[in-house]
């Protein structure tokens, strides 16, 4: 993966965040492992002599661009490259402001897809996890896991209910948390559920959890609204699953990459007695 240097020539915060977002997500909002980090500079003179790609704020990378510069080993100045989509600096990139781009334009296509995802994310319920599950064998006193999908239950099962002093399922989205509270209240998993959109995935309980569910139902589980960007402090010797919270498209567009990156670093540093996993 590459490091990207963004020369912020426009000083438009919304445009800069759009540029950052599309380093990590394509025009269809799918995550791409092309850039591992980006750094904003005021001028090209501030960029160190290291490997990376230089673009301007307002230049949005495309699939063709990523394929041409899949992995670079030197510092390459790509400002003005023909495979970068140019976005106007006059627009503030606020969803409440009418877009200046014409129907059928690449710019409008990118923005409409992005805005739909951001609006949907406010109430989105993940019925299943987007990443695969890897069993964990650890010893911890406390468990904290996101309310998305089935993964927190799977992790608790593998760590061992009896070995944990407390179990907390958390989320920033109240609707997601309420969904998990409902499932936990069921002595056995229901055959089907009736849930309003927006949702992601299908209700398809993993076979290995159906048998475990009565034990999960009997367990003392805390359900808590929690925003990881506020840098919570977990009890010592906690096992914490945070998924892709700090590399989530709506959050990067809302907060900016540097704030998300700094918040993640702070969370790990302040909770150095804990095991924190993303995958």
Image: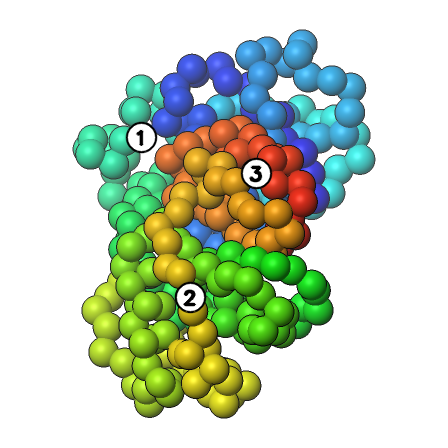
Image quarter hosting the N terminus:
top right
Neighbor class of circle 3 (other Cα within 10 Å; few <14, some 14-19, many 20+) is some
Earlier sequence position, callout 1 versus callout 2? 1
Determine whether, in the image, residue 214 is placed left or right of residue 261. Answer: left
Residue 274's x, y, as percent? 64, 48
Residue in the foreground of this view, choosing between 119 and 23: 119
Earlier sequence position, callout 3 versus callout 2? 2
Which disc number belongs to residue 277? Answer: none
- Does dot 3 land on a helix, a strand or a loop? helix
Residue in the foreground of this view, choosing between 167 and 269: 167
Which disc number belongs to residue 221? Answer: 2
Circles 1 and 2: CB atoms closer than 8 Å: no
Residue in the foreground of this view, choosing between 92 and 155: 155
Which disc number belongs to residue 93? Answer: 1
Circles 3 and 2: CB atoms closer than 8 Å: no
Determine whether, in the image, residue 269 is placed left or right of residue 253. Answer: right
Quarter of the image where one finds residue 184: bottom left
Residue 61 seen in this snapshot: no
Residue 91 seen in this snapshot: yes
Determine whether, in the image, residue 59 is placed left or right of residue 103. Answer: right
Residue for badge 3: 267
When the figure is inspected, residue 263 is found, relative to residue 185, above or below; the finding is above
């Amino acid at each position: 993966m590459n490091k990207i240097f963004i020369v912020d020539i426009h000083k438009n915060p919304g445009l800069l965040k759009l540029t950052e977002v599309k380093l990590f997500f394509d025009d269809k909002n799918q995550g791409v492992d092309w850039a591992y980090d980006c750094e904003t500079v005021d001028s090209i003179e501030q960029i160190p002599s290291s490997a990376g790609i230089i673009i301007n704020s307002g230049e949005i990378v495309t699939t063709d661009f990523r394929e041409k510069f899949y992995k670079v080993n030197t510092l390459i100045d790509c400002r003005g490259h023909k495979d970068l989509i140019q976005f106007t600096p006059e627009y503030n990139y606020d969803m409440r402001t009418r877009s200046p781009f014409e129907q059928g334009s690449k710019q409008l296509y990118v923005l409409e897809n992005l805005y739909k995802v951001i609006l949907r994310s406010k109430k989105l319920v993940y019925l299943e996890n987007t990443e695969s599950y890897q069993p964990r064998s650890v010893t911890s006193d406390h468990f904290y896991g996101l309310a998305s999908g089935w993964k927190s239950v799977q992790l608790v099962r593998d760590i061992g209910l009896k070995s944990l002093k407390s179990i907390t399922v958390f989320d920033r989205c109240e609707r997601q948390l309420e969904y998990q509270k409902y499932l936990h209240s069921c002595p056995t998993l229901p055959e089907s559920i009736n849930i309003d959109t927006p949702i992601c995935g299908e209700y398809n309980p993993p076979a290995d959890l159906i048998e475990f569910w009565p034990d999960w139902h009997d367990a003392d589980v805390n359900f808590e609204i929690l925003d990881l960007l506020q840098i919570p402090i977990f009890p010592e010797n906690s096992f914490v699953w945070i998924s892709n919270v700090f590399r989530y498209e709506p959050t990067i567009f809302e907060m900016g990459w540097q704030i998300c990156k700094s918040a993640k670093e702070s969370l790990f540093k302040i909770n150095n007695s804990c095991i924190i996993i993303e995958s």
